[in-house]
Structures are given as C-alpha cells and as structure tokens.
Amino acid sequence: MTTKALEGVRVIEYGSFISAAYCCKLMADLGADVVKVEHPDGGDEARWHGPFLHDEPHPERSGLFLYLNLNKRGVTLDTSTPTGQRLFHELVGGADILVENWRPGFLATRGLDYERLRQSNPQLVMTSVSPFGQTGPYRDYVAYHLNACAVGGVCTVGEPNREPLAYPLYQGHYQAGVHAATATLVALLQRDFGGDGQYIDIAEADVWASYHGGGGLMAFLQEGRVKMRTGHRTMGFYPWCVLPCKDGYISEIAVQGYQWKRFLELMGGGRVPDWYAKDPRFQDRLELSRKYADEMDKLQAPFLMQHTKEELFQMCLERRIPFAPLYTVEEVVKHPHLRAREHFVEVSSEDAGPLTYPGAPYKLSETPCAYGRPAPRLGEHNAEVFKEIGLAAADLAELRQTGVI
C-alpha cells in the first residue's frame, strides 16, 4: 500500500465556510487525519450554501460543503461550555496542527487561544485565517472575501469608465486557504527538524497585496505610477486582449511581432490585409495599444465572428500563434485534456450518492492523493474520535443529552 504524503499528521479544523476548510482539505487530500469540529446546532455555515443536489436545501447535500470536506472526519462540540472547552483542549493536545478562521480574539474568550493551547502542546502548529489578520487597525472588522480583495488592491480590473470588477467565486477565501496550508506545512517541517510549534497569522488582504509583483502596486512603489483599468485587454502592446467570436470568446496574446504578423496573414488569407499594412497608425504596436485598440478590435470582428473558438484555436495552433479559447464551466468539465489527466474524481456519500468533484491540482508520483472518504455528516465520527481521547459510550450519551456534542 502506498504511504500517503502526510500520513500520521493529525489536524484539527475549527472554523466555518471556506478558508479554513480549504486549507485543511489540501492536507486531508495528502493523507493527513483531519478532524473537523462543528457546532452541534447546524454545523458549518457551508452546509447551508449551494449548490444543493436537486436544488433542495439540505445540510448533507451542499455541493460546496461536500467538496471542501472530502477525506475528513467530523465531530460536533459546543466550545461555549466548560466541558466543550476541556474536550477541545484534549483534542488539540494530541494534534500536530490546528487551523481556525474565527474573528480575531474569539478563541481567547473561550480559553482556546494559542498561548493557552500550547501550554499542554508546545509542539502545536496553529494557523489563524481572517480577513485582515490578528494585528492592525482593521483586525476586528468583520468582512467578506470581496472586502479583503478590495483592501489588498486586486479589485482593479474592469472597463476604464465603469466600477471595478469583483473577483468571483470566493477567490479571497480559497487563496487564503492555499497560503495557510503552505505556511502551516513549512512550520510543521521546521518543527520536525527540531524546532517547536509556532503560530501563523494569515490575512486575506495580505495575500492579495502580495500578488502585485508585475502589476499596479510595484509600478506605484517603484515609479509612483498609477495604472488604469483597461477592460478586456492589458495595455502595453497589441494584441493582449479577449475578443468575441462565433460561439464565445478567444484570448489573444502575441508577445513576438512575428506571432501577430502570422495572425494578420491568417485574417488576410495568406497576406497582411491592406487595411492594416497601409495604415501607418497601426505599425507601432505600443501606439496601437494605447490609441487605436478599439478600432483594431472592430477590424478583427468580421473574421472572428465567422469562426468558432475551437476553429480559431486549431488554426492558430497550426501557425504557432498563442491564442486560446475561453471555456465555459460545462466545457471545462467535459474537456478531453482534463479527462485524460483524470482530474475529476467520483466520490459517493450516503445522502448525496455518487458525485463528481475537482481533484488535486498536482500529481505526486510516489504519494498520490486518494479520495476514499466522503465529507462527514454532522457529528458522524463523534464516537470514533472522542473514544480516541478516552471517552466511553456513557460519556458520549451524557454529552449528547447536555448538548455539548
């Protein structure tokens, strides 16, 4: 049997919605034993977010929850009670990692902050994910992923004379989860090389503010220059844009001049069209991008609208022109390349039946990911997990009667 990459690592996940859950999903997929702690009354917020199977809201049939919590075990625990707090300490006492995404200071009010947890487990690596981090003037602000994206400076795309566009699909939460998993595993590695545990503070706004290496933030820091929104194109040289075609959209980027010339020849049936070759305004691609890009978009339109995006893609492939189609979600799911790489996986659960999920975005040759466990039902592994910290069946019955689990 193949050893899993994180086999033997115990992770406690205590949070809600996406960022902590995605962070821990990445570790669970690599073989870590992730125990998800939820409140007995309703559980994780993600259970009540769609899409729902057959469009029928149900806490065990949320596609979001089912995806985020593959390969995990689940328990319920009310940490507002002294008994719940004691049991949480015992769970964490035997763990390598704790990941949480409650508002800063919340765990301290229940005696579950890092300083107190490390007293019984100095080897603990604890990671907190929040919109603005554990310090600074914004630390106590409640926020959605859009707020953190805006503070981090990435909501700067869109048409020049319109409102900036938001990043879709909770990207702030997912990106924070990726960075949280990376930092957590680095801290775990350092600990296993002879160090102690440590505390990791992940702010979604920090994550976004670090994504400007070649963009607006560095332009301002180095030159005091403020970049403007450019809509469906990137300014610099033409083409670097997204344009409509017969059945959707195609992205055009031709860094090298010969690539752009080849596409012009494709449009002109083997030669550069006269409307381009004889117009001096179009000969400087930087000037073309700055002043005449809209006009050039319109001049391309008749040719693009005659062809589907797949036809354009194949014609450009043959001529080594780096244009590519923009796929819909349905096209992504059915794409033969992703299917050939076995990106999508099928996992069956008791309540939702067999469903298809996105797989891991990497392939490990010696310790591949495995998807053998569906997302846990609310409190599904209470008996199993609490038995591991010494509770008997009678103890569990009492905890259920008093609402602690």
Image (cartoon, rainbow, N blue to C red):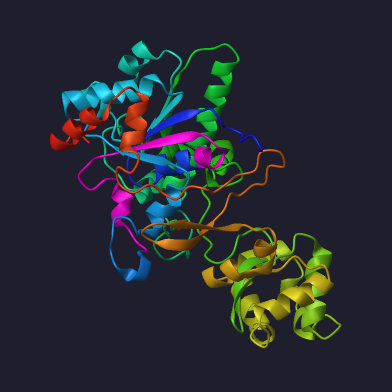
Vertical order, 219 against 244 (above or below): above
Looking at the image, can residue 358 be seen? yes
Res 164 quadrant in image: bottom left
- Residue 4 falls left or right of residue 69: right
**At which x and y percent is residue 24?**
46, 38
Give 383 or 364, whichever is nearer the viewer.
383
Q: Is residue 43 magenta?
A: yes
Q: Which residue is drawn at 83% across and 86% down?
A: 269
The reply to whether residue 108 is in sight is no
> From the viewer's perspective, is residue 309 above or below residue 350?
below
Residue at the image point whose x is 43% and y is 49% from the top: 68
Asked whether, in this view, residue 36 is left or right of residue 6, the answer is left
Q: What stretch is highlighted in magenta?
A: 26-51
Residue 166 image point, x, y percent = 41, 57
Of all residues shown, which one is farthest toward the front?
393
Q: In which quarter of the image is residue 112?
A: top left
Residue 175 magenta? no
User: In what quadrant of the picture does the N terminus appear?
Assistant: top right
State left or right for residue 264 relative to residue 183: right
Front residue of this view, candidates 116 and 153: 116
- Position of the C terminus, as image quadrant, is top left
- Say which of 272 and 71 sits in front: 71
Q: Position of residue 392 (x, y in %)?
A: 27, 26
Is 41 left or right of 116, judged from the image as shown?
left
* Residue closest to the far left: 402
Q: How many marks overall?
A: 0
Q: Which residue is drawn at 69% across and 77% down?
A: 310
Q: Which residue lies furthest to the right in this view?
A: 270
Image coordinates for residue 104, horizontal then vertical, percent: 29, 30
